[in-house]
Amino acid sequence: EILFLDGSITNFAYKGIPHSLRFYLDDLDSIDEGSYIEKFFSLYQKFIRAAYKLITKCILNDIVLVGVSKDSRANILIKHLHKDSKKRPPINDVSLINIISKGKAGFTKPLKFASKISPVRQKVWKAANVFQEDELQSFYLSYFVLKDGVQPIRVDSLLPQKKQLKEIQEAMVTYHDGNGFITPAYLTHKKAHMSQDYGSRIVNLVVEKIFHESPEVYKAFLSKRRRDIIQ
């Protein structure tokens, strides 16, 4: 069995911590109970535990987990190819693949890479008891051009599933939708996607609630900045 994620595994497993909150998470023991920081931390723990649970269940049950991203801006391959150089080209991986492949269908050899883990993230992971295993702190990365002239797509897979790399390559071809992407990820995206108008209404409801319940949070994160007013 194979499970496709609409998006990279690293974004799912390493979901970012807002820069504005990292300072508060430096000392987890000093977070005030009932504060918005404590509420965020609690919700974030639930999320990463769910992500960790999905990943470990896939490994234990021999379900191949694949993350697929059609709009990747990563420069992991560029960094790898120029790791011994003082300068590297100011382009991302997708641009490099387009230049090298000249738009022809194909795929890159899987590259093992490890995302940078900040001290704050290490503390949060330890508190949630997730991603402590070395084998879950690195991933395999490939790029696929499934049809001549289409955009390269990023494909992530798990280190413990190294023996399934050939199966992943075959699955990408099998589930190709004929337009350069894969059908399962496309259907997932369509199901989860919301219109801009609907999304704006939800955001406005959240902003209104924050304004009434926590004016200090509204002022810190949602008040207009000078450049917004000038624009």
Image: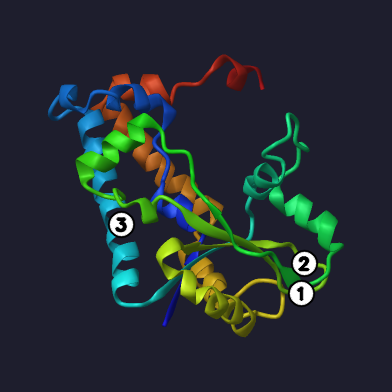
Measured Cα–Cα span from mark 2 to mark 3: 33 Å
Quadrant of the rendered image containing residue 229: top right
State whether residue 6 is above or below residue 74: below
Residue 200 location (% of width, % of height): 48, 45
State whether residue 170 is above or below residue 104: below
Dot 3: within a 10 Å radius of its alpha carbon, few (fewer than 14), some, or many (20 or more) residues?
many
- Of the numbered discs 2 and 3, the one sitting upstream in the chain is 3
Q: Secondary structure at mark 2?
A: loop
Q: The disc labelled 3 sits on which kind of residue?
A: Tyr
Q: The disc labelled 2 sits on which kind of residue?
A: Val
Residue ID for mark 2? 150
Q: Secondary structure at mark 1?
A: loop
Q: Secondary structure at mark 3?
A: helix
Residue ID for mark 3? 52
Circle 2/circle 1 CB separation < 8 Å:
yes
Residue 161 location (% of width, % of height): 43, 70
Q: The disc labelled 1 sits on which kind of residue?
A: Lys
Residue ID for mark 1? 147
**Camera-side residue: 50 or 200?**
50
Circle 2/circle 3 CB separation < 8 Å:
no
Q: Quadrant of the C terminus?
A: top right
Q: Nearer the viewer, mark 2 or mark 3?
A: 3
**Camera-side residue: 73 or 165?**
165
